[in-house]
Amino acid sequence: QVQLVESGGGLVQAGGSLRLSCAASRRTLSNYAMGWFRQAPGKERQFVAAISRSGGSTDYVDSVKGRFTISRDDAKNTVYLQMNSVKPEDTAVYYCAAKWSPSWSRVMYEYDYWGQGTQVTVSS
């Protein structure tokens, strides 16, 4: 079983940057494709970004393309989400997830393990 712990959230002004981290324990992340999802108050959890097991393929929801970057460092057993030019609509709890597969997915239910989430609040 994979245990995922997110960190790096906080309060940031619009236009600023944050880097979220997702560290894994108990199992190596190199066996998993990884994704980031977010959930704003009163809304459903939505896909944000994903990266393949090899790191060679990534995917982003249109609203974050060009602003967010997902990456992985398997030596550190950590996945990152670099968030630049943040907007108030990026405010949400951000979750990382692991999928036992070489390929990423946008489908929440295809992920096997989830972290507890980290709050990101963007002020205008």
Image (cartoon, rainbow, N blue to C red):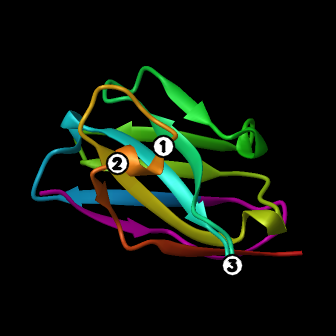
**Quadrant of the frame with the N terminus:** bottom left
Q: Which residue is mark 2?
A: 111
Mark 3 element type? loop
Asked if residue 49 lies left or right of residue 6, the reply is: right
| CA separation in Å, label 2 and label 1 | 8 Å
Q: Inspect the magenta stretch and tell me whether residue 115 lies in it.
A: no
Residue 57: x and y in percent read: 47, 22
Q: Which residue is mark 1?
A: 107
| CA separation in Å, label 1 and label 3 | 20 Å
Asked if residue 101 lies left or right of residue 84, the reply is: left
Q: Judge the density around disc 3: few (<14), some (14-19), many (≥20) Cα neighbours within 10 Å.
A: few
Residue located 75% across and 38% down the image: 62
The residue type indicated by label 3 comes to Gly
Residue 78: x and y in percent read: 32, 50
- Do labels 2 and 1 touch, CB within 8 Å? yes
Residue located 53% across and 56% down the image: 37
Q: Inspect the magenta stretch and tell me whether residue 9 lies in it.
A: yes
The residue type indicated by label 2 comes to Tyr
* Residue nearest the viewer, comparing 124 with 108: 108
Residue 98: x and y in percent read: 31, 48
Q: Judge the density around disc 1: few (<14), some (14-19), many (≥20) Cα neighbours within 10 Å.
A: few
- Answer with mark 1 or mark 3, whichever residue precedes in sequence: 3
Mark 2 element type? loop
- Answer with mark 3 or mark 2, whichever residue precedes in sequence: 3
Q: Which residue is mark 3?
A: 42
* Residue nearest the viewer, comparing 18 with 48: 48
Specify the farthest residue to the top: 56
The residue type indicated by label 1 comes to Val
Reply above or below: 64 against 124.
above
**Quadrant of the frame with the C terminus:** bottom right
Which residues are the magenta region? 1-18
Residue 90: x and y in percent read: 73, 63
